[in-house]
Amino acid sequence: MTDMPNTPPADAIDYRRRQKIARIVQRLVIVVSAIVLAIYVLAPVSWLVSSAFQTEAEIVSIPPHWIPDEPTLRNFEAIFTAGDSEPVTYETRSGTDPAAGDFIPSTAKNLLPSMLNSLIVATLVVILNLLVGVPAAYAIAKIRFWGRNASVYFILITRVIPDIALVVPFFLVIRKLGMLDTLGSLVITYLAITVPFTVFIMIQYFEGLPDELDKAARVDGCSRLQALIKVFLPLSLPSLVAVVLFTFLASWNEFLLALMFTQTSASQTLPILLASFTSDFTVSFSFLNAAGVLAVVPPVIVAIVFERYIVSGLTAGAVKG
Amino acid sequence: MARIRFTNVNKKYANGFHAVRDLNLDIEDREFIVLLGPSGCGKSTTLNMIAGLEEVSDGNLIFDEQVVNYVPPHKRDVAMVFQSYALYPHKTVYDNIGFGLRMRNVSKEEIDRRVRDAAQKLEISHLLDRRPSQLSGGQRQRVALGRAMVREPAVFLMDEPLSNLDAALRISMRAEIKELHRAMQTTFVYVTHDQAEALTLADRIVVMNDGVVQQIGTPDDIYERPANTFVASFLGSPPINYFDGVLEVGPDDRMSFIRDGLRLALPAAHAARLKGQDGRAVRLGIRAEDVAEGPAELEVNALSGTVNSVLPVGSDQYLGMDFGGEELFFRVGKDLRHAFGEEITLAVDLNRLHIFDRETGQSLIWNAV
């Protein structure tokens, strides 16, 4: 055996070193991009939360205080006592100091009721979505019937039309039904928008589950509905969670239709009310931000509860088709 | 108790595909029936119709005396084992096996007794707490069998249950399924495309092709007396050899098969069935194993040709032989060594010849029985 040279010739390219540098550069790029993206996403939310605990004067100070000098719960207190105090009007405003934030919007007392409205609407939309969308998706995915493909396309086509184009027809129908300014009008129209998404996601998932599972369940003594409930639903938990999150958030955040169909506190949802705070003769940023923090709490709770399923749920629906 | 009868049953799908045509089949109580055929021949569709998973388009499906065309699967007393096992991934082995009983409101104690009993028989007692994903293929297969067994159904359906197992396991599971049938004393309907499975398991085999039943009979009937060239070709390894020729009554009044220089004298029993067919163009079938080596005793059964391939398969060897431009395959013992290009003469077992109509492929000897 001949001896192998221990050192490479001087003019040889050191691939090992190159690879090492490339790896470091690659890692650096990923870390920097991640940090930039994180700042981009988190900064507005951080400011919302931070400013909710600041006084009006501190909010408008320059440079801004990311961490409040004197954290205060006054803004939240104002929200929960908004009904008791006299709202500031054009006539009475001279008695207050806008810079100190000692005023609250005229519609402030509707904040908590509107939150309840939002919660009722979102919850109903989620429940009805599951009741309507899941059996529909199961039928389309697992039962061969005449017009099956046509119905899939029909459902999907409703998603192609932008919501703004639906506003006028929706409005006419809702008015004809005498449902203007009711929560029912929101539930119905939100369902029209979210059910196609639910059906689509669930079809994708159910089609990925083997037909033989369905057959086995039915031979084992399940009716179609029992096969869906006892075998398919437990297996499709990730997709169900994705559907619940999507429909809850879509209903919670929806603005356009709610703006059209609601007029009073009986049916106004949170986004409408928050927007109304900016239409007073003056804006209280501290109050608005505190309300904003309250508005994101329910979706965040829902997201945290279902967090471990979110990723697998969204990919599970996306892999096929 | 379950006797299953198909009377003129047809299955047409919405897309126009005619999966099963005019099926007439009478399955006796406690019989082991195997539906055999290539993919797409309609055998699984037939099984699904028995299970109630596919609707009968036309004709009647009768369990004992009751027409069950529209009875949903969960109201039929059938259990089924699937090719992919179809175990419920989210349930433990115990719950998988007990699921069918729970759906039928059997008491908890009874479920427990039956599940443990079945698990013991199938030697999977130690796996009851696991989930399907933690099991090997063979173990999953046993769980699937257990799930069907505990139901104690009137009809036991199996859709290619062994095709996902490796060769050794498949053979041992075959024996177990046969034993299961003996122990359960219930009607078994088994679908496969594997001839060896069909021949070892069945009381009777139903050979299907393109949705049409080709032949129904015992394994011996199907193998020894195939009704047509499809059945003859589908069973046997290497497959049966065919060559075309004509029938001719010789000067000695014996009927023979004639082709070029070849003359094979047909035995009296065959000749009697072919009476009056002198001069008819036919297709001759010789199964690969129906030849013997060494010089033919008489000229009447000798087949000569050139060896053009030798494939040893352990127990014996396959010989590829060129016979007047036709490629024939025979199975012979391995005592004699053969070489490429060698001229050989094989003695044909005349009693085991098959003669088919050249146009229709129907047997001219066995259809007349």
Image (tube, helix red, strand yellow):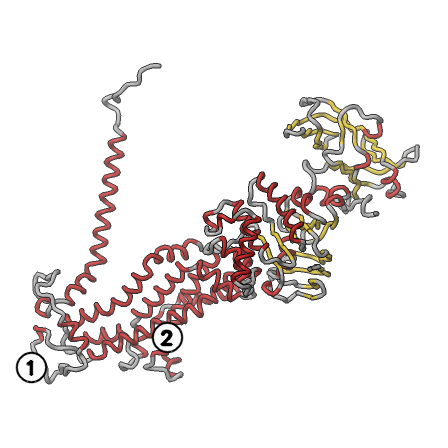
- Amino acid found under the numbered disc labelled 1: Gly
Q: Which residue position holds label 2?
A: A187
Marks 1 & 2 on one chain = yes
Q: For the residue carrying disc 1, how many other residues have a C-alpha within 10 Å: few (<14), some (14-19), or many (20+)?
A: few
Residue drawn at 70 percent across, 23 percent down: B335
* Outermost top residue: A1
Residue drawn at 7 percent across, 76 percent down: A97
Q: Nearer the viewer, residue A2 or A168?
A: A2
Q: Residue B66 placed where, x, y %?
A: 70, 66
Secondary structure beneath label 1: helix
Q: Which residue position holds label 1?
A: A95
Q: Nearer the viewer, residue B184 or A130?
A: B184
- The picture quadrant where one finds residue A169 is bottom left
Q: Earlier in the sequence, mark 1 or mark 2?
A: 1
- Amino acid found under the numbered disc labelled 2: Val
A253 displayed left or right of B362: left
Q: Residue A173 placed where, x, y %?
A: 40, 80
Q: Is residue B275 above or below residue B259?
A: below
Chain containing the residue with disc 1: A
